[in-house]
Image (spheres, rainbow, N blue to C red):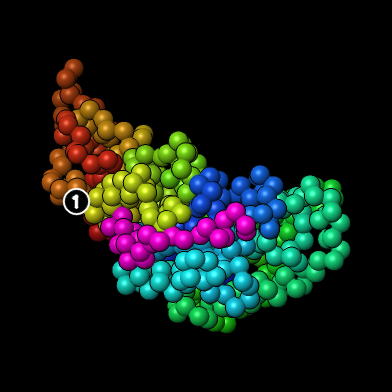
Amino acid sequence: MTQFANWPTAYPSPEWFIQDRFGLFIHFGLFSIGARHEWYMTTEKIEPKDYRKRYFDFFDPDLFDAKTWAAEAKKAGVRYMVFTTKHHEGFALWDSQLTDYKVTNTSFKRDFLAELLPAFRAEGIKVGLYHSLIDWYHPHFTLDGLHPQRDNQVERAKNEQRDIRIYQDFIAGQVEELVTNYGKIDYMWFDFPYSHRDWGWSKGKGAQDWDSERLAAICRKHQPEMLLNDRLGLGHGVVTPEQFQPEKPFEKDGLPVLWEACQTMYGTWGYDRDNQEWKSSDMLIKMLIDTVSKNGNFLMNIGPNARGEIDSRTLQRLHEIGEWMRLHQRAIYSCGPSKYLAPSDCRYTQNNNKLYLHIFSYPYKQIYLKGIANQVAAIHLLNDGSEISYRGFDPDEVITSTEETIQPDDLLVLLPTIKPTVLVPVLEITLQPE
């Protein structure tokens, strides 16, 4: 097993994670009714009792069909999913025995996880659970600078009556429910420590506030093969940057870092009816490719609407990405970075002797591959398997004003003049055995 700087040797092998590369994040909750940023409970400073009154009684995703969600994910080419069991608003989407603020007490009455997880497993998709360490609804979650009641002086004065140990028991109990009542869980995705924040009257919360060691122990005890992300604040686990693509692979102390790029389809994570910051399918595919080329996983988010449906704009992107993945999946799954330097506006991914050149900006007729002479056995367009011609340096060639000048270590690849009818063309380069 590859050694990662952020992955303890006692932790289970992340091999499936590295091979699958492409995951689906699903943000769903009471905030789906508000149809704007999933943080609006705090950005708009809505009191917890008011928030419950406005949204809890109206939560009824009557068009939800777990099999439909799972089938769409399968067609898009994702290999694992992560679903929001509870976001910062504190609303539980499973039949928790530790709160009445849960999906089975709404008009919907059904346990979301009991339907969702089996449907995804039936499609061969691994299941992960997002769980917020923040709970703005819980009475013993002490107020801080992120809390919706941060400017309510009466509530701030009650902080001395709040007991974070009671909250620790609550969150530990909910995590234990999740990892014991719903079968095998492949990935636990906690969110998030912010102990570095300081507002003067309060400080942010971190591992000590959550009792993160206890949470990790519960996970390890009941799901010993389950992966964990880094947001327990314990200094290890899958690194999970949001809305950010790094310049190069993450490394620490000379070792690679296990990481995952978390990207939305638009400006926010939950359903956002009026948001116009949509990423195109082309951009999302390029992000996926870019992430794999930098030894990371790509966790792409969707936010179903309040009636439990995936909206048409999201479906369009899922379908277009799925069609690209149908033809190019072997340039993604089980692939990672390459030692070779990709041409401008391109990315390399590689799996053993198969090197994949993803062409972001399609050139006119030709492209140079640097430092790869005598390494190539064949080149094909991946979308249709057609042969691509190439040639290298010829010391006996007489160069006139019309010939190409090719460096001894390079190859010149001769491309079709017309770009193939795929969003991102890929060349499959078969390398000579070493």
Question: What residue do we see at 19% from left, 30% from top?
Answer: 365
Which span of residues is magenta-colored? Answer: 52-76
Q: Residues within 10 Å of mark 1 (few under 14, many from 20)?
A: few
Quadrant in the picture for residue 304 = bottom left
Question: What residue do we see at 37% from left, 59% from top?
Answer: 63
Foreground pick, 346 / 391:
346
Residue where numbered disc 1 is placed: 377
Q: Looking at the image, can residue 201 be seen? A: yes
Quadrant in the picture for residue 80 = bottom left
Quadrant in the picture for residue 297 = bottom left
Q: Looking at the image, can residue 128 be seen? A: no
- Residue with the most extreme left position: 386
Q: Does residue 54 show up magenta in the picture? A: yes
Relative image position of residue 200 (x, y in whole percent): 84, 48
Foreground pick, 208 / 346:
208
- Main SS class of the magenta portion in the image: helix
Element carrying mark 1: strand
Q: Name the amino acid type tagged 1.
A: Ala
Relative image position of residue 325 (x, y in whole percent): 28, 52
Relative image position of residue 146 (x, y in whole percent): 71, 50
Q: Please, is residue 238 above or below residue 348 in the view?
A: below
